[in-house]
Image (cartoon, rainbow, N blue to C red):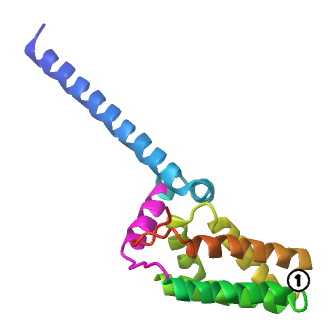
């Protein structure tokens, strides 16, 4: 067999090996992102033009999150937030529209205290999803109800569910098992 044919075969073998390694790395990256983001991964992939674009967005979200200086909330401050939440829940019976708005405001204050940006809802939800992927969809749903309360289009049941959804993220953010880096154990 001529030498040039051996060289061609060797190049093809190397290219196949490189392609297999790249494919395996992509599968590992996808699996790691699925594990980290859970249902948020499926939501992002479902809304993207393709999986690669969605995963790049999630990686960018993780990078931006890692630049934040997240911190746990001191015990005394945490207790004050819990007391405020109890007042919001009690207030729901008489003024459900106002209670949803106050709950949203309280959650924003907790997020700001933890170190999350609070100026832009979408950015905020994206960054929160890195640490709290299991409840960020609840937060998005609650925000949708909040927007509908402004035009009085939300039902009392919608608003009750919004409070439940806000509470899920509120609980996660105030978890007593917060790590110094902002994650939840």
Q: Is residue 95 above or below residue 128?
A: below
Query: Is residue 76 in the magenta section?
Result: no
Residue 167, image x and y in percent?
A: 70, 74
Residue 158, image x and y in percent?
A: 85, 75
Secondary structure that dominates the magenta span? helix
Residue 95, image x and y in percent?
A: 87, 92
Q: Is residue 53 or residue 91 the one in the foreground?
A: 91
Mark 1 is surrounded, within 10 Å at the Cα level, by few (under 14), some (14 to 19) or many (20 or more) other residues, namely: few
Residue 59, image x and y in percent?
A: 42, 61
**Which image quadrant for residue 132?**
bottom right
User: Which residue in the structure is indicated by mark 1?
Assistant: 153
Q: Is residue 21 above or below residue 154?
A: above
Q: Is residue 115 left or right of residue 133?
A: left
Q: Is residue 94 left or right of residue 169?
A: right
Q: Is residue 158 above or below residue 56?
A: below
**Which image quadrant for residue 120?**
bottom right
Q: Is residue 60 or residue 73 the one in the foreground?
A: 73
Query: Is residue 68 in the magenta section?
Result: yes
In this figure, what is the number of numbered marks? 1
Question: What is the span of residues highlighted in magenta in the rendered image?
Answer: 55-73
**Which image quadrant for residue 93?**
bottom right
Residue at left offset 64%, top offset 76%: 170
Q: Residue furthest top?
A: 1
Report whether residue 119 is seen: no
Q: Is residue 153 above or below residue 9?
A: below
Residue at left offset 16%, top offset 16%: 5
Q: Quadrant of the N terminus?
A: top left
Q: Is residue 94 or residue 150 the one in the foreground?
A: 94
Report whether residue 29 is seen: yes
Q: Is residue 59 or residue 52 the one in the foreground?
A: 59
């Amino acid at each position: 067999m001529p030498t040039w044919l051996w060289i061609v075969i060797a190049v093809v073998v190397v290219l196949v090996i490189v392609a297999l390694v790249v494919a395996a790395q992509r599968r590992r990256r996808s699996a790691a992102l699925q594990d980290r983001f859970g249902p948020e991964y499926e939501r992002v992939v479902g809304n993207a033009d393709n999986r690669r674009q969605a995963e790049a967005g999630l990686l960018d979200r993780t990078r931006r999150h890692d630049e934040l200086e997240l911190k746990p909330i001191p015990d005394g401050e945490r207790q004050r937030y819990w007391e405020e939440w109890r007042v919001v829940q009690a207030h729901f019976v008489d003024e459900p529209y106002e209670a949803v708005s106050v709950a949203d405001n309280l959650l924003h204050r907790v997020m700001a205290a933890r170190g999350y940006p609070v100026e832009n809802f979408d950015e905020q939800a994206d960054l929160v999803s890195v640490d709290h992927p299991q409840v960020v969809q609840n937060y998005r749903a609650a925000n949708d109800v909040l927007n509908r309360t402004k035009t009085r289009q939300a039902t009392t049941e919608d608003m009750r569910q919004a409070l439940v959804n806000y509470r899920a993220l509120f609980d996660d953010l105030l978890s007593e098992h917060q790590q110094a880096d902002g994650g939840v154990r």
